Image (spheres, rainbow, N blue to C red):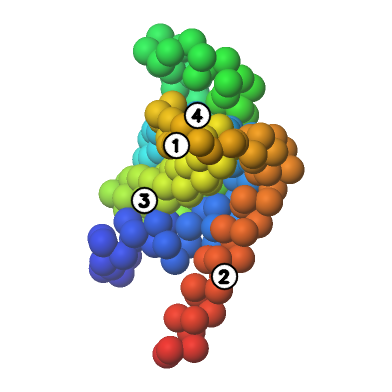
Amino acid sequence: MEKRSIKKEFTKGIWAKNPLFVVLLGLCPALAATTCIKNGLAMGVAVIFVMTLSNVIISSLRNQIPRAIRIPCFILIIASFVTIAELLMKAYLPPGINESLGIFIPLIVVNCVIMYRAEDFASKNNIFYSAIDGAGMGIGFTLALIILSAIREALGEGTIFDIKIAASYQPAVIFIMAPGAFLTLGLLLAFFNWQRLRKKERL
């Protein structure tokens, strides 16, 4: 395998191939679990954990898994780490966060971001680069969730990490509802697309 930049492999998921803002994967948990920063951060950490470790195992077994049944095998591996993540979160996170995230933690099993990296990268590369890719993509997804949830919490609740922004601010409750999620994500996608177009024009 050709030698490549570790930094480039790690950082591609943060900007150039950000799962949410560029590749447009994982929209369901992004819209549902970002009503506040705590929820977005918890979901992101779970995705980093599952994506990194599942990438490592899938990469290590890539030559032993028959191609015809690779997807069921990938799902089984991912599901194992999702179960571990869910049990750890129930044991150590405040009950309110677990209740807010609800079904979206178990649904990480079929999160298209994780399946995409398993099929497109981990199944074709060695363990080291697969771990780097999983961690970088997971961090990029987490940062996207934090940005989205920070805007929604600030506008919809008037708080950041439950700290009141200003006593006089009247929250726009729509931002913590489904329409606000779509609106905020749409504006963020428009902004990042505009940034990429400007960058291309300068080249």
Callout 2 crowding tier (Cα within 10 Å): few <14, some 14–19, many ≥20: some
Q: Secondary structure at mark 1?
A: loop
Q: Which mark is residue 39?
A: 4
Front label number (4 vs 1): 1
**Disc with the residue nearer the chain's start (3 vs 2):** 3
Tag of residue 193: 2
Choose between 159 and 186: the one closer to the eye.
159
* Of marks 3 and 4, the one in the foreground: 4
- The foreground one among 41 and 81 is 41
- The x and y percentages for residue 133 are 38, 52
Identify the mark nearer the N-term, 4 or 1.
4
At 61% from the left and 65% from the top, the residue drawn is 190
Mark pair 4, 2: CA separation: 26 Å
- The residue pinned by badge 3 equals 136
Find disc 1 in the rendering and name its residue: 166
Where the C terminus falls, by quadrant? bottom left
Label 1: few (<14), some (14–19) or many (≥20) C-alpha neighbours in 10 Å? few
Residue 99 is drawn in which quadrant?
top right
The amino acid at mark 1 is Ala
Q: Earlier in the sequence, mark 3 or mark 1?
A: 3
Disc 2 to disc 1, C-alpha distance? 32 Å
Please name the amino acid that badge 3 sits on: Gly
The answer to which of marks 4 and 2 sits earlier in the sequence is: 4
SS class, disc 3: helix
Q: Quadrant of the N terminus?
A: bottom left
Q: Earlier in the sequence, mark 2 or mark 1?
A: 1
How far is the residue under mark 3 from the one under mark 2?
A: 21 Å
Compared to residue 48, the image places residue 133 above or below, namely: below
Residue under the point 57% across and 58% down: 188
